[in-house]
Image (cartoon, rainbow, N blue to C red):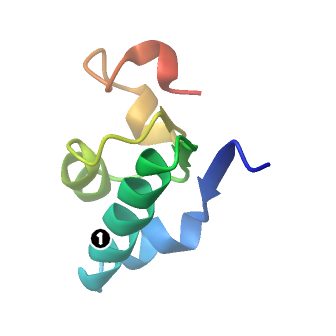
Amino acid sequence: AVDLIRLDGQMITNMDDQIEWLCVVEGIIRIAGQLGIKTVIKSIDGEFQYHTLLNVNADYWQGNYALMFDNCPAAEMCV
């Protein structure tokens, strides 16, 4: 059984130029949550990405930019 989905960093990077990717990321996280599958957002390496993704409710975050802030969504989740 699948218990964790890690979203590819390219999906997050693409959000910088194509906001449609935010809809894709949000959709994957929402569906995973409904199925009880944990999610990891990878490659949060910029201010736009960080602030845009604050409210998508991923379980874990990865990326240099996310780790710079004390207010990272549940700092212990930033790996």
Residue drawn at (55%, 51%) of the image: 42
Residue drawn at (37%, 75%) of the image: 24
Q: How many marks?
A: 1
- Residue 56 at x, y = what percent? 27, 48
Q: Is residue 16 above or below residue 48?
A: below
- Badge 1 local density, few (<14 within 10 Å), some, or many (20+)? some
- Residue 9 at x, y = what percent? 57, 63
Q: Nearer the viewer, residue 5 or 53?
A: 5
Q: Is residue 16 above or below residue 29?
A: below
- Please name the residue that numbered disc 1 is placed on: 22
Quadrant that contains the C terminus: top right
Left or right: residue 30 versus residue 5 is: left
Three-letter amino acid code at the position of disc 1:
Leu
Residue drawn at (74%, 50%) of the image: 2
Q: Nearer the viewer, residue 33 or 77?
A: 33
- Residue 51 at x, y = what percent? 20, 47
Does residue 41 appear in the picture of this structure? Answer: yes
